[in-house]
Image: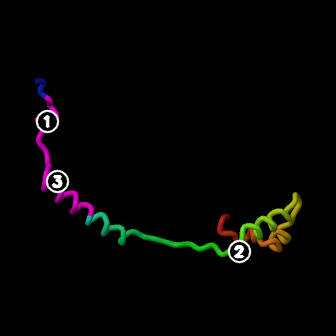
Amino acid sequence: MAHCPASSQKGISGPPLRSLLAAAMVLLTGCSNLLPSSREETISSWHRFEQAKAAYDQITPGTSRAELKEFGFDVANSPNR
């Protein structure tokens, strides 16, 4: 029968390993509250996709920024600048 070198290696196993993994999970889960978080909410002038599409469809080459603002596209104050 062949000797498997991996089976002769010593390391942490059994209950000590499980305890170590459980402690690591508890500590790492608790750390998520220490990380910064943010939430951004974009306010749109449209409530449905069809409204946005209708405004978009009015744009033609040469449309001015003032006209875009009338259609609901305020390029100066857009969160996606």
The reply to whether the magenta stretch includes residue 7 is: yes
What is the secondary structure assignment of the residue under circle 2? loop
Q: Nearer the viewer, residue 64 or 1?
A: 1
Secondary element at tag 1:
helix
Report, in whole angstroms, how far the alpha carbon at label 2 lies from the one at label 1. Answer: 63 Å
Distance of label 2 from label 3 (alpha carbons) = 53 Å
Q: Which residues are magenta?
A: 4-25
Name the residue that disc number 2 marks.
Answer: 47
The residue lying at 11 percent from left, 35 percent from top is 8
User: What is the crowding at mark 2: few (fewer than 14 residues within 10 Å), some, or many (at least 20)?
Assistant: few
| x, y percent for residue 3 | 12, 27
- Image point 24% across, 60% down: which residue? 24
Left or right? Give the position of 23 relative to 63: left
Q: Amino acid at mark 1?
A: Ser
Q: Quadrant of the N terminus?
A: top left
Left or right, residue 38 beside residue 55: left
* Disc 3 residue type (three-letter): Leu
Q: Earlier in the sequence, mark 2 or mark 1?
A: 1
Vertical order, 67 against 25 (above or below)? below
> Looking at the image, how many numbered discs can be counted on the residues?
3
Instruction: Find out whether residue 70 is within the magenta segment.
Output: no
Q: Nearer the viewer, residue 57 or 49?
A: 49
Q: Which residue is mark 3?
A: 17
Mark 1, residue position = 7
Percent position (x, y) of residue 62? 89, 60
Where residue 64 sits, quadrant-wise, is bottom right
Q: CA distance from mark 3 to mark 1?
A: 17 Å
Residue at horizontal 86 percent and vertical 65 percent from the top = 58
- Examine the residues drawn in magenta and state their main secondary structure: helix
